[in-house]
Amino acid sequence: MSAETIAVAEPTMDDSPDANPNVHPPAHPWAAGADAKAVESWAAARLERYDRSLDRLLSVVATRTIENTLRPFDDAQAELATVGQHASLLDSVHPEKDMRDMAQALTQKVSEIGTLLSLNQEVYQALSAIDAGQADPATRHYLDRTLLQYRLSGVDRDEATRARIKELQDKATELSLAFSRNVQEGTRHIQVAAADLEGLPEDYLQAHPPAEDGTVSLSTDFPDMQPLMTYAKSAEVRRLMFLAYHTRAYPQNQELLLGLLKVRQELATILGYRSWADLATADQMMGSAENMQRFLDQLEEASKAGAEREFKMVFDFARQRDPELKEIDLAARGYWYEQYRRSAFQFDSQSVRPYFPYAQVESGILRTAEKLFHVRFERNADADVWHPSVTAWKVFDSSDGDAGANSDAKQIGLFYLDMHPREGKDKWFSAASLVPGIRGRQHPEAALICNFPGGKEGDPGLMQYSDVVTYFHEFGHLMHAILGGDQPWAGISGIRTEWDFVEAPSQMLEEFFRDPKLLATVGRHYQTGEPLPAEVVARMNRASAFGRADSIRTQLVYTSYSLDTHNADPESLDLDALLVAEYRRFSPYAWIDGNRMYASFGHLVGYSSNYYTYLFDKAIALDFFAQFDKADLLEGPAAMRYRKCVLEPGGAKPAAELVRDFLGREQSLEPFKVWIGEEFKRHPRAGWAEGAKGLAEAGEDGLVWPEFANEGDDDLRW
Ligand SMILES: [Zn+2]
């Protein structure tokens, strides 16, 4: 069992650099008192090791082998990845702006070094000359994939072309970093009259007392924004927040995004691809933009009828409540869904919040993951952290029966939890790899960067159930990074697999949220300690199963936007017109003028054309989840088989093989299609009243689909 209530220790200073150059530089640059200068010198020591590894590789005169060529190449990769990931983390989380600025510059520098490496013909030729005929499959796969990525980078082009590619890549990094920074620092505030907060929960009102003039100031940060969009009765206030939220990085990011799209298109053209979307899918499971479009068309078809019926049910209901209502706009979707669920399923999402105080949820999720993945977590109060609120946890393997806290079980990794918002910190939810695991040399390390309620003195941090689903999601990434981290090579460690597979383990874990037994561990009343009653869980599951087809359509808006912005000539692209067109195509909710969501759609930077990853991996995750014994999710043999077949291999095999290994067959879209339309197969012609009654009486647990609507029309998390 994990230790839960150990106070955060003062960071220690035992990581001071050693004078001996052969000694490994400290793992992390955030020892106590570390300023920007100290971080820079930490990075410089790492980058020097990078240079030495490359020199070692290039100075070989003998026959090229795995040991004399791939090993130094991988050492170099590991150093570069470690510096890059730390820089990127500090850029996202560090409380001081000068540190974030330095970290951003460092991220740019690491990216430039990476581009140079990807265009280095000598290195490419050396790697190509390795005879890997006798090597193990993981090593052969690593080498093949590395050579493919070299070719996709343009390493075999002439010198002038490579110089242009380098320029464009550097420009793309610069634009991406600036875009993300604007989102991160772009908090807005709205002022509303205290009376306009009708419908919001008591603890929310207490946390936002009115100023002397009677107004309340609310930020676009998630814990302020999300409850407002779900519960506020005032349509005006919701619309005000919706627009503030979706313009928090506008107009700055409009130009940056257009610039980035142009750079990407030029890169694709130089490399012989019709569009960026084709280039960005060439080494992914998806394979091409055409395949992506076909996949989206299938989902379009599979969700159409269900979404129309769901919308009609909610709209008819809303009009009964408010006969004047002409439409439901994008800022009203979450509110009306909440009202509908209360009425049709007797499920009020506020009623479960007291069962999800942050600290209880955290310890419940840790314990669930320990059982499911056969690991043990132990709080590491001695670890250096970048902020006093961050906690560090050691991970031990307990797959051969060890569960005792005092055993000498093998430590297999370390992770950090940075879970609450603060000034200057990234506003979303993400998992980050920090140190790649290399067998016999170093453990994998990873971190969660989240913005959940709580973390303040006297605030229990009551979470919405969609927050808890998000926690499960992010923990799925974390476990993938740690359990996949026992590899011979840094380049295939943890989540370094096809990028369009990484949302499968995270979304798989979301499915566990619906289990009443499991929720009795995670959800306990913050005042009475009473577990979340199974009967409430059943109603919650049924209520949240309603609206699946509709939420697929919202995801299709984002997914198509991500594809279409990267699949046509950016010179003639109108970001606003395209956004309106996507909403009109997939969504029945009235458009709100002034919505510039693309300006804070961070995935356009990180995932570029490949936001489809969420839907694609949702289909895989549902197929995976069907393998688990629903009567006993945590104890059955599927859990260990899943760990072995899907998580542990990391990037040692093509992702499609991992999927086949676990399923024993090809992956199928059927479970996803069934899942989307399930409820309506049972109630094919239901109007809102009878349909809802039927759903409420169906007596069957639905799966949970995270609440896109409640999140101000966003489900953009990594
Ligand atoms: Zn994710």
Image (cartoon, rainbow, N blue to C red):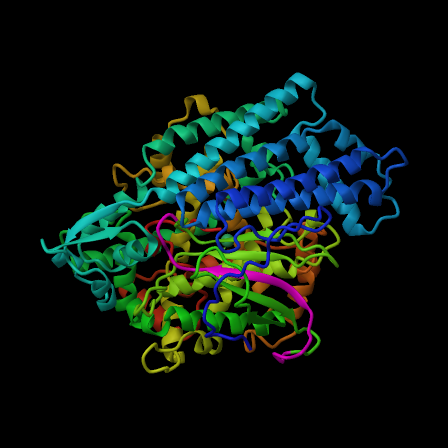
Residue 587 seen in render: yes
Which of the 4 image quarters holds residue 467?
A: bottom left
Image location (x, y in percent) of residue 367: 52, 74
Q: Looking at the image, which residue is at 49% across and 51% down?
A: 718
Q: Looking at the image, which residue is at 66% across and 74% down?
A: 398
Please state which of residues 40 and 124 is positioned toward the viewer in this rendering: 40
Horizontal placement of 321 versus 248: left or right? Answer: left
Residue at far right of view: 62
Range shown magenta: 403-424
Image location (x, y in percent) of residue 224: 28, 56
Image location (x, y in percent) of residue 92: 45, 47
Horizontal placement of 126 versus 694: left or right? Answer: right
Residue at far front of view: 19
Residue at far top of view: 160
Q: Looking at the image, which residue is at 53% across and 39% down?
A: 107
Which of the 4 image quarters holds residue 252?
A: top left
Please state which of residues 115 and 347 is positioned toward the viewer in this rendering: 115
Image location (x, y in percent) of residue 482: 62, 60
Horizontal placement of 134 versus 514: left or right? Answer: right
